[in-house]
Image (cartoon, rainbow, N blue to C red):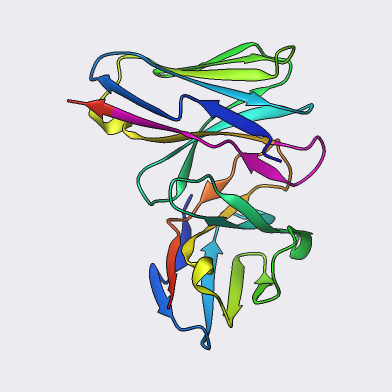
Amino acid sequence: SQQGEEDPQALSIQEGENATMNCSYKTSINNLQWYRQNSGRGLVHLILIRSNEREKHSGRLRVTLDTSKKSSSLLITASRAADTASYFCATGNTGGFKTIFGAGTRLFVKA
Amino acid sequence: DTEVTQTPKHLVMGMTNKKSLKCEQHMGHRAMYWYKQKAKKPPELMFVYSYEKLSINESVPSRFSPECPNSSLLNLHLHALQPEDSALYLCASSQEGGQNYEQYFGPGTRLTVT
């Protein structure tokens, strides 16, 4: 079964607004990662948050992790049209090689 | 060089053909991955190689055959595919295997099986 589930499935916002995406997972993790995928292209790593961290920032990105609720959120502030993409959370089995991606959120930022 | 390259970008093949997908990285990464992605779905892990040895095979049909000739190259040999195998095939690499390392993805090969 999928490790990560994301909501919303799709999100449409105006340029300049903030976008928040959520991810839930089922088992213990060492860390959680977020990736972006532009249409039909390869994925780009955005940020990794470790299980002992609660919040992490990278530029306009803010990621939170709540291990008690097995959930994470990705906030993109002051969105731009270039942020239009699909966003996936990714987790893996502790100590293993397997990476499982969530269903993804498709973000559309209107100029 | 932080790039993962994949060839070809597009591939159309019949169900009786044999073809290969290629992936290359020169970052010194010791783990390499194949994923399959259908439209509007997340990538699904197929195979993981760690130090040139197959570490994970996610119950992939034998018509897909991976090969890791050296630490920089990863191939996926295709034979007798079905139309439902049409998808975007993504290669990735990471410094080591496991969840503590970010994966670098190639642009993918879009495969159409006719």
Tell me: residue A45, above or below residue B33.
above
Residue A3 percent coordinates (x, y): 69, 35
Say which residue appears at 54% left-offset and 28% top-offset: A6
Q: Quadrant of residue A19?
A: top left
**Res. B27 image quadrant:** bottom right
Which residue is painted at 71% across and 75% down in the image?
Answer: B62
Position of residue A111 measured from the top left corner of the image (x, y, whole percent): 17, 25
Q: Most extreme residue toward the left, as rendered?
A: A111
Q: Is residue B61 above or below residue A99?
A: below
Give the side of residue B34 with respect to residue A74, left or right.
Answer: right
- In the rendered image of this protein, does residue A104 appear above or below residue B113? above
Give the quadrant of the C terminus of chain B: bottom left
Q: Which residues are magenta?
A: A92-108
The picture quadrant where one finds residue B52 is: bottom right
Magenta span contains residue A107: yes
Front one among A73 and B101: A73
The x and y percentages for residue B106 are 47, 55
Q: Is residue A24 magenta?
A: no
Image spot of residue B9 (x, y percent):
38, 67
* Residue that protrudes farthest toward the bottom in the picture: B16
Q: Say which residue appears at 69% left-offset and 27% top-offset.
A: A31
Query: Looking at the image, is A11 positioned above or below residue B91?
Result: above
